[in-house]
Image: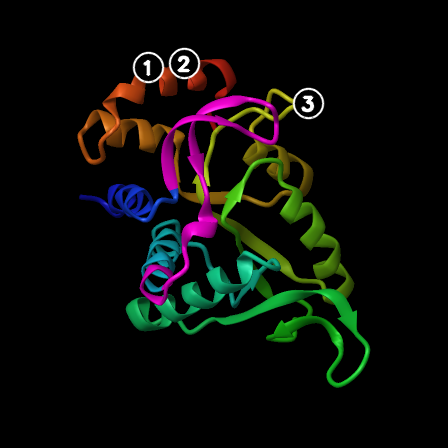
Amino acid sequence: MTYKQEFIKFMVQNGVLRFGEFTLKSGRIAPYFINTGNYKTGTQLAKLGEYYANCIVENGIEGQTLVGPAYKGIPLAVTTAVALANNHQKDLNYCFDRKEVKDHGEGGLFVGKQLTDGEKVILIEDVMTSGKALREMLPKLEQTAKVEVAGMVISVDRMERGLQSELPAVQEVYKEFGVKVYSIVNMNDIIEAIEDGVIEGKEYLDAMRAYRATYGVEA
């Protein structure tokens, strides 16, 4: 199996990717649901970091520091940094933002690597629906230093058009901010994994395809 197929199977085995009928925040009724909150063990996080690291290396994303938006992005950035060092001999810095600026001690908006002008950063997040996390993070980065965002890495690209646009979220943020978003897998990969028997769920294929036809767009 490819690492993408392994990742899809990994999500299913850990209850992160489920099939059925789910009402999303957008109000759409989806035949699948992704709950990254179900990653909760050290073994799961270690493996998850390997998939993120593979995605970074495969796509040739070059950066000096991994940035994990609070809160879900924090453990993701940490485990990805460890996997890059252990498996790919890439020793990158990492940092994450505070929800509130610290006005004592070392202070500042970020914990970990203190960002400097000209630094290349890679944002690490779980999924992207509307691009909200990126929109909240960019002003914090700009307030701290004139960094260059080399890209944003997420686990799953749902490949859906936005609520107020025909563009998918990954294209919207690229058009608006010039930040390219990379995903370990996308909805097409999940559908293909079912078709190829990598994971079970052939009974959901028609619903998956119909949902893709209704709300999907090519990234």
Instruction: Based on the picture, tell me whether residue 39 belongs to the magenta stretch.
Output: yes
Q: CA distance from mark 3 to mark 2?
A: 21 Å
Q: Residue at x 47, y 71 (%)?
A: 92
**Disc 3 vs disc 2: which is toward the camera?**
2
Q: Which residues are magenta?
A: 17-45
Residue bearing the label numbered 3: 164
Counting residues from the N terminus, which is met first, the one under dot 3 or under dot 2?
3
Residue 133 in picture, x, y percent from top left: 64, 48
Residue under the image location 41 percent in, 55 percent down: 39
User: What amino acid is at disc 2?
Assistant: Ala
Quarter the N terminus occupies: top left
Spatial CA span between label 1 and label 2: 6 Å
**Mark 3 Cα within 10 Å, few/some/many (few <14, many 20+)?**
few
Residue placed under numbered mark 2 in the picture: 210
SS for tag 3? loop
Q: Quadrant of residue 28?
A: top right
Q: Residues within 10 Å of mark 1 (few under 14, many from 20)?
A: few
Q: Which residue was labeled with disc 1?
A: 206
Q: Which amino acid lies under the numbered mark 1 shown in the image of this protein?
A: Asp
Would residue 191 appear left or right of 183 to someone viewing this image? left
Report the amino acid beneath label 3: Gln
Task: Count the labels in the image.
Answer: 3
